[in-house]
Image: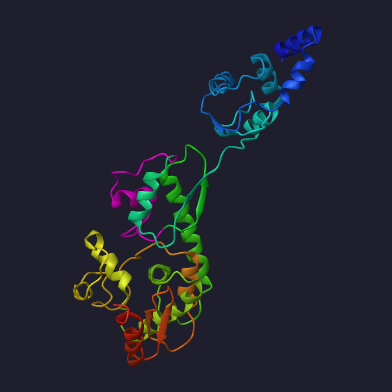
Amino acid sequence: MLLFGILLGGWLAHGEWRAYQQFVDQPLTNGDIERVIEVRSGDSFRHVLTRLRTLGVKEGRDEYWRYLAWELGVMRKLQVGEYLLFHGITPRELLGRMEKGRVIQHRFTIIPGWNLRDLRLALAEDPVLEQTLPGLSEGELLTRLGLETASAEGRFLPETYQFTRGVSDIDILKRARVAMDQALQRHWQARVNDLPLDSPEQALILASIIEKETGLAAERPEIAGVFIRRLRIGMKLQTDPTVIYGLGDSFNGNLTRAHLTTDTPFNTYTRGGLPPTPIAMPSEHAIIAALNPADGDTLYFVSRGDGSHQFSRTLSEHNTAVRRFQLKRR
């Protein structure tokens, strides 16, 4: 405090106070190119000022910057993170952001319908996240996440997660796992009565199938209704996405009749009931549909080829729809 009082007195004596006042609210001439300055753990303001100079910030004597930092409380409260040097920002605005911790927010989006492999690949390709997952087995991943399940598949809620530099890939997964747990429990409590689902786990599995079957929000409850009715009467689900998931890396994009008859734990043509785990990350809308299926008597559906589906009550109606919408295209 004494040092800055002496400095201020010297400025007043030599007429520099006006120059300082002009400096603090004058836009930095960093051109039209936005730059990022990073404040790292353990940095002093001297380190920050050196980094600003390296980025091309020439305005203001070092004493001006240090006095402004002291005046705004930045000397005592320098927040770690990245700060944007945007066009027109003033020294007061920049240091004010550092004092308040108004750091740059990055985003990572989990896409509905991704499987665990898709998610891990996207995390590994993110240029900002700290990487801790590459080389980690799924069992090791389950341990780090505190999951007591056979698989991490489907456990992460698709949405956009904001984060700051220094956050790791596992941090994103932990947040997405908590978000999924909360969404699943919330909608499980609000489910309709008499569903043939014994647990939130089974609801998650069914929701993942619904997610893979259609991208149309309006169709999800009706597709859920078909699967729920099939489960009630003991009819196989016979859904292609589960077969494809069970084929894993061997699937080349062309689903054949041989695939449908090749038994795997996920083949719902050869096995009754739900598959053993989710097959993808279902959206919250798919979870809602699984727990609030549409009423009706349809037991079949087939793609129309435009993203929508034709629903049928009987096998005869379904075969007619297949000939109309599938065989004709071939």
Q: Is residue 25 magenta?
A: no
Q: Return the x and y of residue 48 as percentages of the image width and height.
A: 56, 23
Residue drawn at point x = 49 percent, y = 37 percent: 165
- Relative depth, front residue between 309 and 247: 309
Quadrant in which residue 72 is drawn: top right
What is the span of residues highlighted in magenta in the rendered image? Answer: 128-155
Q: Position of residue 176 (x, y in %)?
A: 46, 54
**Which residue corresponds to the image point at 30% horizontal and 52% vertical from the top-left?**
138
**Image height of 151 relative to 325, above or below:** above
Q: Which corner quadrant of the image does residue 321 belong to?
A: bottom left
Left or right, residue 128 beside residue 137: right
Q: Is residue 119 above or below residue 208?
A: above
> What secondary structure is the magenta-colored segment mainly?
loop
Q: Is residue 136 magenta?
A: yes
User: Quarter of the image containing the C terminus?
Assistant: bottom left
Q: Nearer the viewer, residue 230 or 238?
A: 238
Residue shown at 36% from the left, 47% from the top: 144
Residue 47: image location, x then y, percent: 54, 20
For the question of whether residue 171 can be seen, the reply is yes
